[in-house]
Image (cartoon, rainbow, N blue to C red):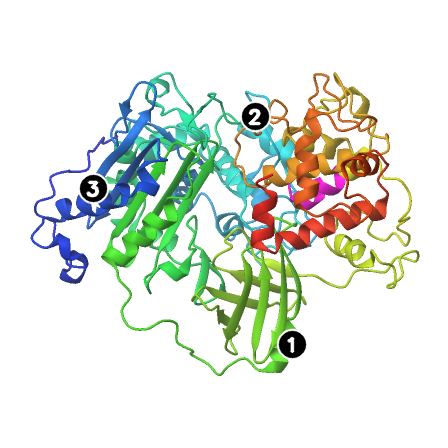
Amino acid sequence: MLPLMVALSLGTLTLPADRVCADPDGKGMTPAQEAEAFADRFFEKPEVNQSLAGAVVVIVQDGEVVLQKGYGYADLEKKTPADPEKTVYRMASLSKPVTATALMQLAEQGKIDLEGDVQDYLGGLSVPNRTGEPLRVKHLLTHTTGFDYTDRAGTLTGPLSLEAYIRTYMPTVIRRPGEAYRYDNFASALQGYIVQRVSGQGFGAYVKDHIFSPLGMANSDFVLTPQLLPKLAPAYDSRNRLIPPYEVVPTEMPEGGMLSTGADMARFMVAHLNGGQLGGARILRKETAASMHTFQKAIHPDIPQMTYGFESFIHQYHNGQRVISKGGDIEGYHSWMWLLPDHRSGGFIVYNNEVSELRVPFFQAYMDHYYPLRGGGAEEKEAPASQEMLKRLEGRYQELRSPSTLYTVKAEDGRLTVRDSSGSHTLKGDASLLFHDEEGVPAAFREEGTGETYFYSSSHPSSWARKLREPEPYQDVPESDPDAGAIYLLRQLGAFGDEGQTRFRPDETLTRAEFTAMLVRLSGLQPSKEPPAFKDTAGSPYAAQIQSAYEMGVVQGEGPGIFAPEQPLTRLEAVSILARHAEGSPGEGEGAPPVAGKAEEGAGGDAAGQPESAATPPEAWAEQGVRFATAAGLWPAAAREEAAQRQWLAQPMSRRQAAAMIGSLLLQRMEAEAWAALLQV
C-alpha cells in the first residue's frame, strides 16, 4: 500500500490561455486563485448561499488539485465548517464508478471476461432470463441488462449482507440484454457481488485494499465505521431540519453506499485522469482506464449515455466537449463528479441538504467558464428527416425506468412535437434520427431490428422510453365508452396486470388492494420481498405490492396491522393515496429510508391506528387528499359544494372511475405547470 497525498501546491500549474482568460476577472491570477474566485462567485449568489447547509467543491487539472474548498456548515447546530479534508458525505450513486473500477481491475487481470455470461460468476445464484440471450458482464457496466426491475421501494431492515440482498432481490431479464439503456441500481449491486465472488474478499474490503488505500483515500469506506461517524456531515431537509441518521441496506452497498470526502474524491478523479495512476500508485492500466472513458452505449453517436461505469448526460451544457460523469442522490446528500479526459480536467460538488438543484448550474458555470462554446450551435450533418420517417415515429412513449413518465410524439410540418413533463417541445432533426429542440437540447430515436422504437432526450437521463403498442381491446369497453381513452392508456402501461384478459368489468367496485397494486405497477419499482407489515394481507395476491406501497409511505392502513385489502375502495381513500403517491415521486431513491413524517403532517393515517376510511366526512388525515382532488380537477360537475363533495368522496370507487382518475393525472403530469400545482397542495 502506498498512501499518497495529492499535492496542493499549485503555483506551477498552467492552464491553456483560452480557459484561464475565459473570465476577465481572472487575469493575472494563478490557476488556484482564479478557480477559487470562480467558485466563490457561484456560492455568493443569494439563491445559493441562503438555502445551503454546507457544500464542498473540487476542481482538478493535469494531475493536480486546483481547488478543494468548503462552503457553509457541515453541521448547522455546531457551526462546523464544511471541510474538504475532514467532512465525510454520503456519495450515493457516485459509488458506481468506484464499483466499476474494482470490477475492471479484475477484468484486466483476466479473472473476469466482460463478454462472459454473468451467470458464470454467481456461484449458486441464478439470474432468471426469458430472452434466450445471455446477460453479459458488460451489460451490467452499461446499464443495458434488460431487467424487469432495477430499483426497489422504501427501506429494508438490516443488517443484510450483499449476498443475501442479491439472492432475495434478483430481478428477471425480460428485454434483450444490450438493447436499451435503463438506469440500473441492481446492475451495480451485481458488479459488487461479482467482485466479492471473484476476489474472495468482502466487497468493501476489496475496494479498501485495492482502491482507497493505494490512493490515500483514508476517509472513504462503504461502511459507516466508528472512525467516520464523527466526521459525517448531518443530513438536512429542504428547511434545514435535521434528518435522523440512517444506515443503508445491504450493509455494503456497491450501488450507493460509499462515504467519502472532497479531498478523497479528488484523488480518485486525478487517478482516472492520469490513466489509472496517482503518484507511485497505479489502480488501473492506462488502456483499462481509457476503456472506462470510452462511450459504449448510445442511442445516437452524438448523444452517448454510458461508458463502463460513467454516464454522459445534459449534453446541451457540454459545449462540444467529451464529458463523462456520475451523480448521486440519497436522502439529505447530493453529489456530482464530471471528468473531461481529453483535457485531464474535472470537477466535483457535494452538499448535505435538500436545497434546490445546485449541481447542474455549477457544472454549467464550470463549462462556460473553462470550456466556452466556440462557434454556433448544433449543425445538421445529414438531410432533414422526411415526413414519412417522422410519421413512423409518432405515438406514445413510456420510460423504461419510470412507467408513469410518458411522452406523446406527433409529426407536424416537417418537425416533431413532443409533450412530456417539462411541457411541449418542437424537435427538428435529420435522417439519422438526431433531433434538437428549440433550446438546443438534443434528442434521438432508435429503431431496433426487434421492432422496438426507443426515444431519448438529454434532459431526461433516467432511461430510454419505448414506443407503446396499441392495447388489446376489452369486450366490455367499446371505443365509444366515455372512459375508454383512460382505460386503454392504463392497459398500455400495464397498470392492471391483466395481460391476456378479455374483460375489464368497468363498473365493478375496486378494492383497496387492487388500487394499490395499480399504482405500484406504474412506479416501476420491484414488488417488496419484505414480510407483510399488515397481518391481513399475507394471503393476498397483491401482498407484495401493498408492502411496497407501505414502504414508500403511500398507504398506512386501517389500524394496527390491518389493511383490509378486500374492502371496497372509497373515493376519499383514492384521492388521499394518490396525493401521497404524487408527492413521494416513487422510483427516485437509492437505498434511503422512505420519507418520514407523512402521517404526522396530515398526509394520511398510519399503521398504528389512524384510519384511512371515508365512512365519515373527511377528517384532518384526509385534508391533503381533498386539496389534491381540487387542484387536479377531479370533482364531477355535481360535486362543487362542500356537502356534495363529502357525499361523493364517501362513495365506493368503480374500476372505470379509478382508471379515469389515474389517467387524468398521468396526462396532467405531461403538463409541467399543472403537475407543479398538484405537488404544492
Residue 19, quarter of picture: bottom left
Q: What stretch is highlighted in magenta?
A: 516-528
Q: Does label 1 or label 2 sit earlier along the sequence?
A: 1
Which residue does the image show at 57% across and 43% down from the upper left? 120
Which residue does the image show at 31% across and 37% down from the upper left? 49
Please tell me whether residue 472 belongs to the stretch shown in magenta: no
Which numbered dot is residue 67? 3
> Residue 308, image x and y in percent?
43, 51
Q: Distance between the residues labelled 2 and 3?
A: 37 Å
Q: In this view, does 630 lie above or below 411?
A: above
| Left or right: 398, with 612 as reference point | left
Q: Main secondary structure of the magenta part?
A: helix
Q: For this rendering, which residue is in front, 666 or 220?
A: 666
| Label 3 Cα neighbours within 10 Å, binned few <14 / some 14-19 / many ≥20 | many
> Residue 649, image x and y in percent?
80, 36
The residue that label 1 is drawn on is 391
| Left or right: 392, with 363 as reference point | right
Q: Residue 496: in sight, yes or no? A: no
Q: Is residue 460 above or below residue 56?
A: below
Which residue does the image show at 20% across and 39% down from the upper left? 280
Which residue does the image show at 18% across and 45% down from the upper left? 37
Q: Distance between the residues labelled 1 and 3?
A: 51 Å
Q: For this rendering, which residue is in front, 303 or 110?
A: 303
Q: What residue type is labelled 3?
A: Leu
Q: How far apart are marks 1 and 2 (CA)?
A: 47 Å
